[in-house]
Image (tube, rainbow, N blue to C red):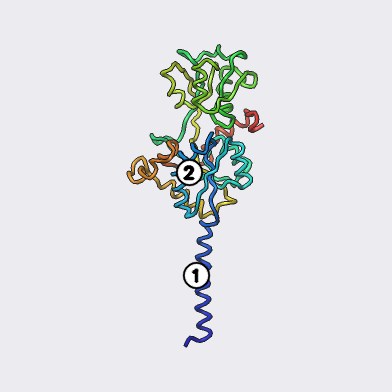
Amino acid sequence: MLGGKRIWQISLFVALQLLVLLCASSLFAAGAVRFAPQPMESKDAIRQQFQPFSRFLAANLRTEVKLLHHRNYRTLIEGLWNDSVDLAYLGPLPYVLAQQQDPDIVPLARFVNAEGDSTYTCALASFGPKLDVTQISSETPIVLTQPYSTCGYLLTAHQLRSFGKNLEELPYYYAGNHSEAALDVIRGKASLAGVKTPVAKQYRHLGLHFREDSILLPGHLLVANKRTLSAEQIKVLRTALLALRPRTDLKDRELTAEWGVEFRYGAIPVHPDDYAEINKLLLQIKVPGVNE
């Protein structure tokens, strides 16, 4: 028969093993992880673009990932600040704004496009054979995408300054997205649009002319809330994302084939210097309702 001391030793060993297992599982199974993609009009659009990606996140975290729906970036960013959002897919300007006020919002990885590029530019677009600055007046409005779009108010105001124009003194409105902004210029509703250069190129065949800005902007990224996710969870996701090679590896390409087109081609590490130009512009330009 086992002596009392031996029984006590076995019991202690078993208890320690159980404690280790509980601690390890708590890193990943502390409830559903709340993931907020970029704002979209409908939940169906979010599910279509982000559900397969959320399954990848869930598999690596070994816990459920819940997709959240936000109609605008303001409520999404506030969700990060008030800890009702654990993960978010953000554009560069929303990320800078979120991180400036809350350093616990940390980047995991920045996504690349089909060519492997991780940067893009903004453009001023007008209808006709060339960009005509004489069209910029107080009579015909300028069309922008939405307030938190990097190519929206911020970069449009920056570009207009090179023409000696002040966006604060000109009429403008928001179309909601880049395509609608470009099309409103073609329809004659606006004299000028501030959009992503790749979108402006898509409508060049319809008579859209554009002037590309020289600032290279970092692409969209996935961020995490350090207060609501553990260091281990953040490490696991960052490692998993950066390990993917869908542009060169067939298995990874098959894995990401159903992800949204803006984030299915792989990712690169994020560096603070990537956002230096945006930080500098925010010191010079106040976006109404955003960083006033």
> Could you say where residue 124 lies in the image, as x and y percent from the top left?
51, 21
Closer to the N terminus: mark 2 or mark 1? 1
Amino acid carrying label 1: it is Gln
Q: Amino acid at mark 2?
A: Ala
Residue at left 61%, top 39%? Answer: 75
Q: Position of residue 202 (x, y in %)?
A: 43, 24
Mark in the foreground, 2 or 1: 1
Name the residue tied to disc 2: 109
Q: Is residue 195 left or right of residue 171?
A: left
What element does badge 1 sit on? helix
Question: Quick check: can you spot residue 180?
Answer: yes
Q: Is residue 97 above or below residue 205?
A: below
Element under disc 2: strand
* Residue 159 position in % (x across, y down): 55, 22
Where is residue 219 drawn, in percent x and y? 48, 35
Q: Is 164 on the left-hand or right-hand side of 269?
A: right
Residue projecting furthest to the right: 292
Per the image, the residue denoted by label 1 is 17
- Judge by depth and name the residue closer to the eye, 167 or 251: 251
Q: As drawn, is 196 to the left or to the right of 82?
A: left
Quadrant of image for the C terminus: top right
Q: Which mark is residue 224?
A: none
Q: Residues within 10 Å of mark 2 (few under 14, many from 20)?
A: many
Callout 1 environment at 10 Å: few (<14), some (14 to 19), or many (20+)?
few
Q: Is residue 213 visible?
A: no
Distance from disc 2 to disc 1, alpha carbons, whole Å, reads 35 Å
Residue 262 figure quarter: top left
The residue lying furthest to the bottom in this view is 1
Q: Are marks 2 and 1 in contact (CB under 8 Å)?
A: no
